[in-house]
Amino acid sequence: MPQVTVPRPRKRIAITVIATLLIIVLISAAAALFLFRAKPMPQPGQAEAAALAAAQKLDATHQYTLEAQVLQDYLKTKPPKQYQYQPMLQLGTLALNRHDYAAALQWYKEAEAITGKVQLQDAAGAGESEAALGNKQAAIAYYKQAVALSDPNNFYGQTDYRALLKSLEASP
């Protein structure tokens, strides 16, 4: 009859300790891989979309101060230029609505500088800001640009920049 050897208690304890340590190491490695796995790079525009969505929700609930803070925090991250225009326009509109015309004008001018050309929204906002600040000639110049950029065939929902321009030109 073959002789069966029973491991001594010390060997069993050593095998159990080694097996336990091996399991702990494997679990730790799996946890580390899970926690520190490579995160996909954000797609261009995702941060802007998230900031604008957050700002839009704050705007809908009339939390304008927080909205401005979200947009300014986003711009502090120095995103690529093509993702700065819309937040700057929104900050200009918020300042305009607060009757902070100097700040509004600054935001609209920064938005214009980002694109390198005048667009309807920044021209209209800058024109309104200049008019409110009493800078009639500058307002007229911006409103002329807004008239040139607006679509005469699609007037529904648009401001009548021609009428604004005429009222400014007619006033002393």
Image (cartoon, rainbow, N blue to C red):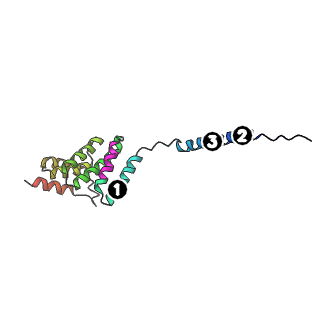
**Dot 2 lies on which element?**
helix
| Magenta residues (range) | 67-76
Residue 56, numbered label: 1
Q: Main secondary structure of the magenta part?
A: helix
- Residue 8 is drawn in which quadrant? top right
Residue drawn where x is 34% and y is 56% of the image: 56
- Residue 112 % position (x, y): 26, 44
Which mark is in front, 2 or 3?
2
- Residue 152 % position (x, y): 26, 55
Residue type at numbered disc 2 = Ile
Residue 15, numbered label: 2
Q: Can residue 145 be seen?
A: no
Q: Earlier in the sequence, mark 2 or mark 1?
A: 2
**Dot 3 lies on which element?**
helix
- The answer to whether residue 27 is left or right of residue 136 is right
Residue that carries the numbered disc 3 in the rendered image: 26
Queried whether the magenta region covers residue 72, the answer comes back as yes
